[in-house]
Image (cartoon, grey):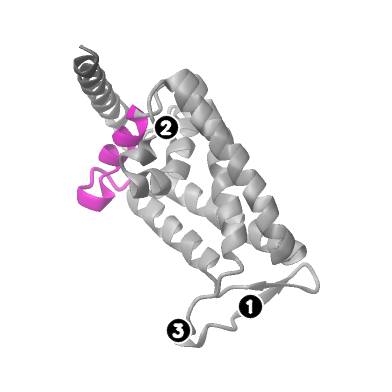
Amino acid sequence: MALGRRSGLFALEKHFAFYGAYHSNKINIAIHVLFVWPIFFSALLILYFVPLPPLFNLQNLEFSMWGNYVISVWNVGFLVALLYSVFYVSLDLKAGSLAALLCALCWIGSSFVASQLGLSLAWKVVLVVQIVCWTGQFIGHGVFEKRAPALLDNLIQAFVMGPFFVLLEVLQTLFGYEPYPGFNSTVKAKVEANINEWQESKQKLIS
């Protein structure tokens, strides 16, 4: 079941409406669906090499998979994936659980890739992926959306909500999913109000 309407940090309507106001063009949305999760995946890949302080004696925690392959758990990538997962589940139980599963799969997959590539090659792969994906998104905003990315107005919210936003977009488009009755219509109204306000302010600057 959905967690229902929340307020403050867990106000899904507010977060989704904010992000949606910057992503109303279908082509731009499709570009983000294609590129947002690879950005998250590649970020976890490089963060695999960043260790965390030796808290709770977990600094050497690791487990084996696929024969001799070993994942080192106690790194920043694991912590980021965990925090994202917990936050998404807190926003909406159903879609958040799916997003948490994707975060876990990204962490496992990126850890495997990182262990195979090594830091000397991994950072080059990450750099290429990040450049390609961010370039695609800026093209989506500049050419199709014709509005600056959300990260220019709220950096943290844009980065945190990005993966969840595109997942909700897919669930809504393919299955008509909404976290609770009335969510989609309420968010749509807020998005339209935000866009109208932005267009009015832009028109005032021009005139």
Amino acid, disc 3 = Leu
Which of the two labelled residues, at mark 3 and mark 2, occupies the earlier sequence position? 3
Amino acid, disc 1 = Glu
For the question of whether residue 74 can be seen, the reply is yes
The picture places residue 55, in percent across and down from the top left corner, at 45, 84
Determine the secondary structure under disc 2.
loop
Which numbered marker is on residue 128? Answer: none
The 10 Å Cα crowd at callout 1, few under 14, some 14 to 19, many 20 or more, is: few
The 10 Å Cα crowd at callout 2, few under 14, some 14 to 19, many 20 or more, is: some
Given the current orientation, which residue lies at the most extreme top position?
A: 207
**Contact flag, marks 3 and 1 (Cβ < 8 Å):** no
The residue closer to the viewer here, 67 or 146, is 146
Q: Is residue 207 above or below residue 81?
A: above
Query: For residue 44, which quarter of the picture?
Result: bottom right
Q: Residue 16 magenta-drawn?
A: yes
Residue range highlighted in magenta = 1-21
Given the current orientation, which residue lies at the most extreme right position?
A: 67
Q: Residue 12 magenta-drawn?
A: yes
The 10 Å Cα crowd at callout 3, few under 14, some 14 to 19, many 20 or more, is: few
Which of the two labelled residues, at mark 3 and mark 1, occupies the earlier sequence position? 3
Work out how far the residue at label 3 is from the one at label 2, CA to CA, in angstroms.
Answer: 40 Å
Q: Report the magenta stretch's main SS.
A: helix
Pair 3/2: label in front: 3
Residue at mark 3: 55
Q: Residue at x 56, y 63 (%)?
A: 47
For the question of whether residue 174 can be seen, the reply is no
